[in-house]
Each structure stands twice: as structure tokens, then as C-alpha cells.
Image: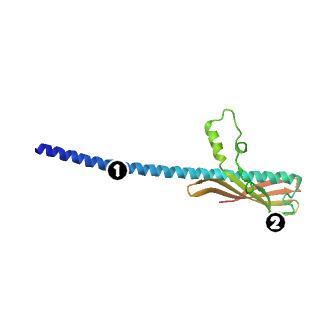
Amino acid sequence: MRAGFKTNRESGAIMVISLILTLVMTTMGIGLFYVANRTSDQIEANTNRSETLYSAETCIDQATRWITKEALTDPHPCKTPAVNKLGDVCYTIGASGNKKTMDDTAWRPDKPSEPKYLTKAKARMLTHEYTCTVALTGITSGASTIHYYKVESTGLGPQVGANPVRSDIVATVSVTIGDSKAGSDAGQSNEH
């Protein structure tokens, strides 16, 4: 009888140890699942931050091209009746209700044998919007006239978690007129 009692006690101890090990392994699995989800969210947020920055830079590039093109026909593209003083916005890309996205042709043309990951990347970029404004901030005269423009750009991405992803860039663009070396120069002055 003692031998049967010992066997029952041993099988009871094995059952308790098995339950404890199952509980520990389940807790570890839940913890790993939680950590993996948090890491995935962080990677998604970082990727979206980069993509919103690309969107904002695209708007800066479009505004710089507009200023350069307009300066070829009129040295002062912001000279309109609506612009009364320095700092007034004279041109907007992606005005409210008409936000711009990085469509396929804006950043990479289609190719017939395009890998699947590029198609997926293009679809992601279409979820990012951008807007920007151009304002004349100053004019200096001398041997040549220089017009200074402030371009403020915002890139907006999809919301990740509770926070929307956003990148803001402010750039200064100058156009030199009246010199044999006339041209335009764009420099990023502030990024946050």
C-alpha cells in the first residue's frame, strides 16, 4: 500500500510542476506577443515619420520649381493684389480640401516588370498628404536684386495609435535677378 501512495504523490507533484511550467510558458508567450506588437507599432511609426518627411520635402521641391519657373517671366511672382505686405502667402500647394499625395509619377515611374514590393511602397506613399505655402519675406537690391521666399511645408501620414504622424519643414528660397550669375538657390533652414 505504501508503494501506491508514493506513486500517487509523485504523479501529483508532476502535475503541479507541469501546471506551474505551463503558467510560466503562457506568461512568457503573452509577454513576447506584447513586446512584438509594441515593436511593430514603433517600426510603423518610424517608417511613417520618414515617409511624411519625404512628402513634406516633395512639396518644398514643387514650390521651389514654381518660384524658379515664375521668376523666369516675372522677377516677383508674389506680386499680386492679394499680397499686401511681406510675409503674406502668395501661393499654396495642396490647399484645404485639395491635399496632394505622392502619386506614382511624382516619385517613381511605373515599370512593366516592377517588383511587388515597389507597388506596395507606392500604395503606402499615396496615404501620405502634403501641403505648403510660399510667402515673400524680403527683397534686397544692389548690383542684383534678390527675392527671399519662405516655404512652409507639412507632410501628414496615417494615424498610428493615438497620434497622427506629421512632419513640418520650413525652407528659405532665394531668387537672384539682374546679374549674369542669376539663378535660384534653395536651402533648408529649419526642420522639426
Q: Residue at x 65, y 52 (%)?
A: 52
Residue at mark 2? 86
Camera-nearest residue between 157 and 170? 157
* Amino acid at dot 2: Leu
Q: Position of residue 5 (x, y in %)?
A: 14, 46
Q: Residue at x 66, y 43 (%)?
A: 122
The relative height of residue 112 versus residue 50 in the rendered view (above or below) is: above
Coloring scheme of the render?
Answer: rainbow
Q: Position of residue 6 (x, y in %)?
A: 15, 45
The relative height of residue 10 versus residue 165 in the rendered view (above or below) is: above
Q: Position of residue 128 (x, y in %)?
A: 66, 50
Give the class, few, some or many, for how many residues have Cα within 10 Å of label 2's Cα (few <14, many ≥20): some
* Amino acid at dot 1: Val
Q: Furthest-front residue in view?
A: 97
Q: Could you tell which of marks 1 and 2 lies nearer the N-terminus? A: 1
The relative height of residue 17 versus residue 87 in the rendered view (above or below) is: above
Residue 49 is marked as none
Please identify the quarter of the rendering in which residue 109 is found: top right
Q: Residue at x 46, y 51 (%)?
A: 35
Q: Residue at x 25, y 46 (%)?
A: 15
Residue at mark 1? 24
Distance between the alpha carbons at the discs numbered 1 and 2? 68 Å
